[in-house]
Image (spheres, rainbow, N blue to C red):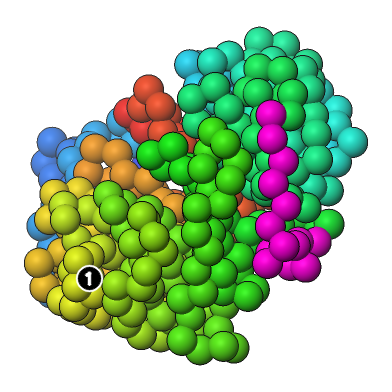
């Protein structure tokens, strides 16, 4: 086995002698890795495995070839475009445009080129998700504000005080010092409900309001407070309280988040409990303790309740734990057929068996993305990894992507991957 160093060359010179070699490629200054290649008589190159820098190639290493290319076909993974606009707090893609919050600015860029279409200054930082509804952008500001902006120009149509919000039909429902119902088009106040049991918990700063979760389902508003452990149901049209529940069995516990599904509300807590409440009256149906709470909500898939923050599968009607792996996942799971993918790992949904796990240490705070047999995600080493979904093997990686905020998912549209990070906006062409 020969070991040869090659610099930045594309295509690079191959070892002249046929046989197996280990070459070190330092591509454009951002990717350095060892690659085992086999040089055949026709000068075809078979890449057997990409090895991490610290690994030492061993004699007799055997693996099925994963890629067959000629020297002229070797591509360096690099962004299709990169917009160096500072830290991105949130982003979304819609109809060929990327809309992103950059500190105290909201921008729109063309998805295929990165060209800025409009750039609007704001009085405060954009936080939380950007929602698009009937030609309008809706988003929160850091200092407890809600904005409505025009999708085409970015001009602000209206703004008001308010925290986390939900859009349902022609109305917007939001939390804050009270629960408000607004007209979606004009922002006009329809009703304002003060819940005395909750009022002392509302604060001015976003990091407190973010703990006040509000969701709308079947014409009702469901509201939960992180601190205090209360859940309420409100008539969405009338603004009247239907019921208030205090389900927590531990008075020192607090609610992280909740979801609604069919006739149930599933809440999870800081101390790792999962509670099931009846949506009609707030009555407790069951509770189970898994341990290790997280802000990541539960998920329902193919009739089962999955808990990402403790990687468990429950029967949603009884709370029976069908399997419990116990891994702590910082983002929602990605489901495909009988598998779920997480922060660079794959679990069999039938029995909870871990099929593979890419363990580089660190965290994946933003939900990864899957496209055509590959999974993409950014670790807190600020590196974008592309892995094979079947094996977890590294296909390529891009260093220096920056940190990706929790509210900024990996966005895929038209075979392109869009990432907003502390180093700006990136676009990668996934077909290449």
* Residue 39 lies in the magenta stretch: no
Residue at numbered disc 1: 313
Identify the residue shown where x is 50% and y is 31%. 168
In this orientation, does residue 41 appear? yes
Question: Outermost residue, top direction?
Answer: 152
210 vs 104, left or right, is left
The answer to which of 169 and 361 lies nearer the viewer is 169
Question: Does 135 appear above or below 377?
Answer: above
Q: Which residues are magenta?
A: 190-203
Q: Nearer the viewer, residue 264 or 43?
A: 264
Question: Which residue shows up at 41% across the image and 51% down it?
Answer: 368
Please state the horizontal and vertical placement of residue 214, each as a whole percent of the image.
56, 50
Residue 97 percent coordinates (x, y): 56, 19
Seen in the image, is 311 located left or right of residue 203?
A: left
Q: Can you tell which quarter of the image residue 150 is in? A: top right
- Quadrant containing the N terminus is bottom left
In the visual, does 131 lie left or right of 432?
right
Query: In the figure, residue 191 lies in which quadrant?
Result: top right
Percent x, y for residue 205? Answer: 81, 58
Count the labels in the image: 1
Would you say residue 198 sits in the magenta stretch? Answer: yes
Identify the image quadrant of the C terminus.
Answer: top left
Q: Position of residue 140 (x, y in %)?
A: 71, 40
Residue drawn at (50%, 53%) of the image? 242
Residue 342, can we see it? no
18 and 269: which one is in front? 269
Name the residue at 38% across, 39% down.
218
The 10 Å Cα crowd at callout 1, few under 14, some 14 to 19, many 20 or more, is: many
Q: Residue furthest right?
A: 123
Q: Within the image, what quadrant is residue 99 found in? A: top right
């Amino acid at each position: 086995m020969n070991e040869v160093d090659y610099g930045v060359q594309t295509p690079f010179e191959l070892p002249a002698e046929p046989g197996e070699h280990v070459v070190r490629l330092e591509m454009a200054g951002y990717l350095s890795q060892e690659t085992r290649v086999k040089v055949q008589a026709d000068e075809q190159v078979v890449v057997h495995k990409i090895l991490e820098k610290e690994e030492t190639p061993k004699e007799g290493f055997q693996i099925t070839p994963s890629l067959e290319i000629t020297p002229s076909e070797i591509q360096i993974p690099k962004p299709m475009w990169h917009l160096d606009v500072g830290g991105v707090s949130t982003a979304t893609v819609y109809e060929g445009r990327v809309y992103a919050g950059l500190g105290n600015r909201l921008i729109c860029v063309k998805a295929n080129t990165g060209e800025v279409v409009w750039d609007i200054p704001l009085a405060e930082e954009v936080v939380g998700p950007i929602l698009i509804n009937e030609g309008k952008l809706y988003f929160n500001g850091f200092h407890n504000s809600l904005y409505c902006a025009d999708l085409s120009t970015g001009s602000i149509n209206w703004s008001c005080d308010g925290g986390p919000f939900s859009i349902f039909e022609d109305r917007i429902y939001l939390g804050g010092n009270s629960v408000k119902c607004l007209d979606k088009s004009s922002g006009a106040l329809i009703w304002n409900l003060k819940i005395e049991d909750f009022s002392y918990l509302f604060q001015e700063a976003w990091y407190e309001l973010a703990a006040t979760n509000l969701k709308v389902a079947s014409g009702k508003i469901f509201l939960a407070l992180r601190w205090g452990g209360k859940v309420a149901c409100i008539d969405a049209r009338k603004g009247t309280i239907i019921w208030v529940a205090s389900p927590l069995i531990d008075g020192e516990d607090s609610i992280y988040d909740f979801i609604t599904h069919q006739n149930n509300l599933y809440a999870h807590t800081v101390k790792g409990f999962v509670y099931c409440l009846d949506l009609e009256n707030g009555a407790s149906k069951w509770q189970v303790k898994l341990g290790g709470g997280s802000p990541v909500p539960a998920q329902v898939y193919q009739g089962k309740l999955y808990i990402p923050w403790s990687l468990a599968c429950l029967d949603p009607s009884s709370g029976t734990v069908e399997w419990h792996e116990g891994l702590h996942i910082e983002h929602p799971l990605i489901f495909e057929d009988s598998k779920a993918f997480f922060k660079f790992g794959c679990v069999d949904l039938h029995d909870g068996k871990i099929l593979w796990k890419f363990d580089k240490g660190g965290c994946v705070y933003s939900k990864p993305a899957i496209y055509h047999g590959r999974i993409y995600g950014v670790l807190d080493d600020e590196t974008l990894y592309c892995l094979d979904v079947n094996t977890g093997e590294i296909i390529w990686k891009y260093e220096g992507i920056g940190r990706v905020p929790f509210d900024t998912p990996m966005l895929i549209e038209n075979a392109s991957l869009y990432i907003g990070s502390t180093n700006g906006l990136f676009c990668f062409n996934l077909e290449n």
